[in-house]
């Protein structure tokens, strides 16, 4: 018997879309502020910060479109929904971050070879400091909501904004050093250092998106799920095996086989699946679709069954088998 539990993914998708609209609005505003700061100071470090903000704007709009697509309900052509659009968005964003890093390195080397005088650094420092604070706050909100709703696009946007924050803070420190020492070559040195930092962030986002597109198993997620299931195991859950977890954008699809006492009726088996569904949702969020195949126990299940009041036990209990990542993803029922 298969039973399915669905989640309110559509409402979550609309929430993700609304947050991404704010991310885009902030990205555009901060880009304008940084361009103003560059024209005031003529600092290549501030220019590199503005170039990364250009990527923020482009990636923000791409993320917005991907979340719009991901929020669409499933249809005949996309029976699992449109969630993988988020992975494509994150892949593009990670690539753009890498490109921005290369551009920053190029501009820094050019400025190092052909230096020019800086001006009004105090105003420039103030303006980019304001953008750093705003970026960090909006990025933190985006990451928190992204993790809650399992949205890689929102997490990527938040990490992008926060990487922008750290690079901006580094640039501010460099500009302050230039302001007090007068050593203008530090402008290019600071820019190159933070170019490599943001390129590493871009690589991590790109790597996560490719893993999602290829349905790569999330071992960290699986290990946490195994830990939660072991800690909250009910005596009517005689066995759990053939566990599969697939991410479709912000939605988790969980498949498994749950062994319950063979004499349970449909309602009783249904109740156990409800308990399993509620446990996973409490720990991993509401954006979940759970498909459970319920099995009746067999004679070989008795030695591993902890049910104390079983009226039809054929063999004595011998040993409880802990669920591990290796045996819970196997398609074979557990036995001694």
Image: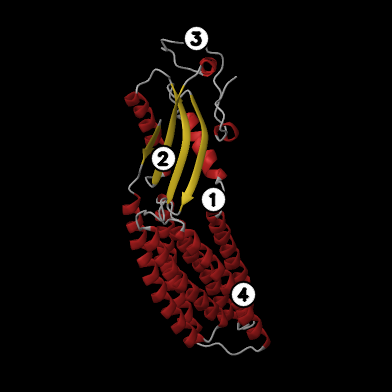
Q: Upstream in the sequence, badge 4 or badge 1?
A: 4
Distance between mark 2 and mark 4 Cα atoms: 43 Å
- The residue where tag 1 is placed is 215
In the rendered view, tell whether residue 86 sits above or below residue 289.
below
Asked if marks 1 and 3 touch (Cβ < 8 Å), the reply is: no
In the rendered view, tell whether residue 160 sits above or below residue 261.
below
Q: Which mark is residue 102?
A: 4
Q: Upstream in the sequence, badge 1 or badge 3?
A: 1
The front one of 237 and 161 is 237
Q: Secondary structure at mark 4?
A: helix
Distance between mark 4 and mark 1 Cα atoms: 30 Å
- The residue where tag 2 is placed is 290
- The residue where tag 3 is placed is 314
The front one of 226 and 253 is 253
In the rendered view, tell whether residue 182 sits above or below residue 28.
below
The front one of 2 and 170 is 2
Q: How is the image coloured?
A: secondary structure
Asked if marks 1 and 2 touch (Cβ < 8 Å), the reply is: no
The residue carrying pointer 3 sits among few (fewer than 14), some (14 to 19) or many (20 or more) residues within 10 Å by Cα, namely few
Distance between mark 1 and mark 3 Cα atoms: 42 Å
User: Quarter holding the C terminus?
Assistant: top right
Asked if marks 3 and 2 touch (Cβ < 8 Å), the reply is: no
Q: Upstream in the sequence, badge 3 or badge 2?
A: 2
């Amino acid at each position: 018997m298969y039973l399915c539990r669905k989640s309110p993914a559509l409402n979550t998708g609309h929430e993700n879309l609304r947050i991404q609209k704010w991310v885009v609005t902030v990205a555009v505003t901060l880009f304008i502020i940084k361009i103003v700061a560059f024209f005031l100071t003529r600092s290549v470090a501030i220019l590199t910060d503005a170039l990364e903000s250009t990527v923020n704007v482009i990636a923000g709009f791409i993320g917005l479109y991907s979340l719009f697509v991901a929020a669409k309900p499933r249809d005949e052509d996309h029976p699992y929904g449109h969630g993988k659009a988020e992975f494509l968005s994150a892949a593009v964003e990670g690539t753009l971050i890498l490109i921005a890093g290369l551009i920053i390195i190029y501009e820094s080397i050019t400025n190092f070879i052909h230096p020019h005088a800086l001006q009004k650094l105090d105003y420039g420092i103030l303006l980019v400091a304001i953008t750093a604070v705003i970026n960090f706050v909006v990025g933190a909100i985006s990451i928190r909501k992204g993790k809650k709703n399992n949205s890689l696009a929102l997490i990527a946007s938040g990490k992008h904004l926060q990487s922008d924050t750290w690079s901006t803070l580094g640039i501010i420190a460099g500009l302050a050093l230039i302001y007090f020492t007068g050593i203008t070559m530090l402008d290019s040195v600071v820019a190159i250092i933070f170019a490599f930092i943001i390129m590493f962030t871009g690589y991590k986002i790109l790597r996560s998106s490719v893993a999602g597109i290829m349905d790569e198993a999330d071992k960290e997620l699986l290990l946490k799920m195994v830990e939660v299931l072991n800690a909250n195991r009910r005596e009517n859950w005689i066995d759990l095996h053939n566990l599969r977890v697939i991410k479709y954008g912000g939605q988790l699809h969980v498949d498994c086989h749950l062994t319950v006492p063979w004499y349970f009726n449909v309602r009783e088996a249904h109740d156990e699946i409800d308990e399993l569904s509620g446990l996973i949702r409490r720990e991993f969020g509401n954006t979940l679709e759970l498909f459970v195949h319920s099995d009746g126990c067999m004679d070989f299940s008795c030695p591993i069954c902890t049910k104390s009041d079983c009226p039809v036990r054929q063999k004595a209990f011998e040993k409880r088998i802990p669920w591990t990542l290796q045996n819970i993803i196997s398609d074979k029922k557990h036995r001694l």
